[in-house]
Amino acid sequence: MSVSQLRVSLSAGECQVLGLLLPPLAAAVVDRAEVGPDLVCIWARAAAGGAACPGCGGWATAVHDRYERRLQERGIGGRRVLIRLETRLLACGNAGCGVGTFAEQPCGLASPYARRTPPLARELAALAGALAGRAGARLAAVLAVEVSRCTLVRILAALPEPAAGPVRVLGIDDFALRTGSEYATLLVDMETGLPVDVLPDREAGTVRAWLKEHPEVEVICRDRAGAYAEAARDGAPQAVQVADRWHLWHNLCGHVRDAVARHRACLAADGCTRLEQPGPREEEPGPREEPGPREEEQDGVPASLAAVIRERHRAVHELRAAGKTQAEAAAATGLSRQLAGRYWRAADPAALLAVRGSSALDPYKPYLRRRWDQGTAKVAALHREITALGYAGSYGTTYAWCSLFRLAAPPAPPAPPAKQQVARWILTDPARLDGAGQQQLPAVLARCPELDALAGHVTAFAQILTRRAGAGRLDGWLAAAAAAGIPELRSFARGIRSDYQAVASAVTLEWNSGRVEGLNTRTKLLKRQGYGRASFPLLRKRILLTT
């Protein structure tokens, strides 16, 4: 007999086992079960002889009528479960009760007007709160529960909001409903880390009205937005405002980047003159000149070039034998990665020094060497010049010969660090700087006294933030920043003075907006799960119910 044809009647012991697998059936008597390829159908009836009247509480046993209810239950064995419950309409025997007749509701199995068992209803509510519509419906199908996305949305909308108790420490932050045009406000209980409300905008009036309804608020953690500062000042004058330390540091980072960009000329070893010097210019060839005396050669290559190439090949392969990578060998020798790669791949220096078909080029080699030393590093231009002087050979021969100049060229001076890199070094704890920062930052600061002073002020402010040194240290830092003569630092100090009390609380109290920022990140995830189609009430419900 196939599974689809299986139809059994269960004994009392087997009913108890089924009640363990499906706990809602513990209060019912199972008459029979039918197992199909994707559905388990169970016929059941209430085990009790009567039920308590919902009006007067009296016990009723008189049966007025019977009908069948179909209840969906959690899946079992990858199959959907349908319980066909024989339900009795009982008549209340109390003459003074106005209920008359009522339907029995076996405990844990049925509830008024429900089409699902209570355990399945709780699971779908959790599924709707976590994943909402389409994603929740897809997961429910995997769990062998048939439910549509619209049903999950209705379940979510019908869930009651969690009761919000008194909030002593409140966190406020905004998030975008539509980036650049529409925003909402998230309110968080900083002591429990749970959201307490979501406001439909970020206007000062809306936040002020909410705060007036909650006079128990003692501390407000916020970013440095003016609307929230105004709302906290007017709506909760009794509360202490605390600026977010991360936003303070973020603002300082922006000013430091501006200051380093203003001093970008100081980043190079030769200061401002490095940025103003033009690159090597190609000199126009003068009157046709006869080739000069030839330099002493080794295997057809000038001895000076051959010596440099052999020495560099030896150094690169010694590093390779020591277990260094090609990039590490390039850094150690001061060569570019492309040039170091040529040495790396050549098994012998002779492979680098071999230049075929160069005999026709011999009379022009001193000219090429002189023009290369003068700064003309474009082989095509050099080939045109010697062609005008009478060379009849190919461009490939000229290129192969000039490649020797590249192999033996002195290492290019290291490029100055980028302004973003210098700003990052200044903003990093000196004890945690990487090797490049430890080597290059002191040289940069030594060349620019203003950046040196800036780095000292940044380190001092970081210590005030991380150690919560208090308003006294903050006042001293503000005075020193104003006297430093650095425009970006003075601008940052003016911003702090305009919000002084909140910043002083930030460097004194333990409260911070870290929890708000974390919940805000989760809020953005919930918003994106709705593909931008969820209305604000639905999004608000998910934010409050997702804990």
Image (cartoon, rainbow, N blue to C red):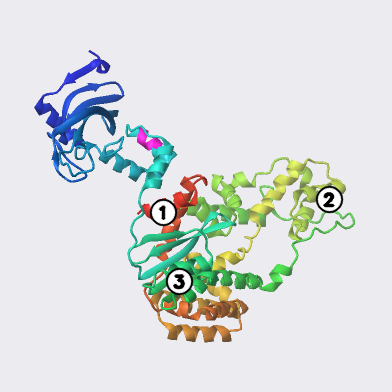
Amino acid type assigned to the residue bearing label 3 in the image: Arg
* 2 and 3 marks in contact (CB < 8 Å): no
Magenta segment range?
137-141
The answer to whether any part of residue 130 appears in the image is no
Residue at 86% across / 54% down in the picture? 290
Q: Nearer the viewer, mark 1 or mark 3?
A: 1
Q: Earlier in the sequence, mark 2 or mark 1?
A: 2
- As for residue 7 lying within the magenta part, the answer is no
Mark 1 falls on what kind of element?
helix
Residue 64 horizontal/vertical position (percent): 20, 30
Q: Is residue 129 left or right of residue 234?
A: left
Residue 250 horizontal/vertical position (percent): 51, 68
- Overall secondary structure of the magenta section: helix
User: Which of 381/160 is in front?
Assistant: 160
User: Which of 37/217 is in front?
Assistant: 217
- Residue extending farthest to the left is 13
Which quarter of the image is occupied by the N terminus?
top left
Residue 265 horizontal/vertical position (percent): 66, 71
Amino acid type assigned to the residue bearing label 1 in the image: Ile
- For disc 1, the marked residue is 543
The part of the image, by quadrant, that contains residue 150 is: top left
User: Which of 108/86 is in front?
Assistant: 86
Q: Nearer the viewer, mark 2 or mark 3?
A: 3
Label for residue 385? 2
Residue at 41% across / 65% down in the picture? 514
Question: What number of labels is visible?
Answer: 3
Residue 401 horizontal/vertical position (percent): 71, 47
Mark 3 falls on what kind of element?
helix
- For disc 3, the marked residue is 245
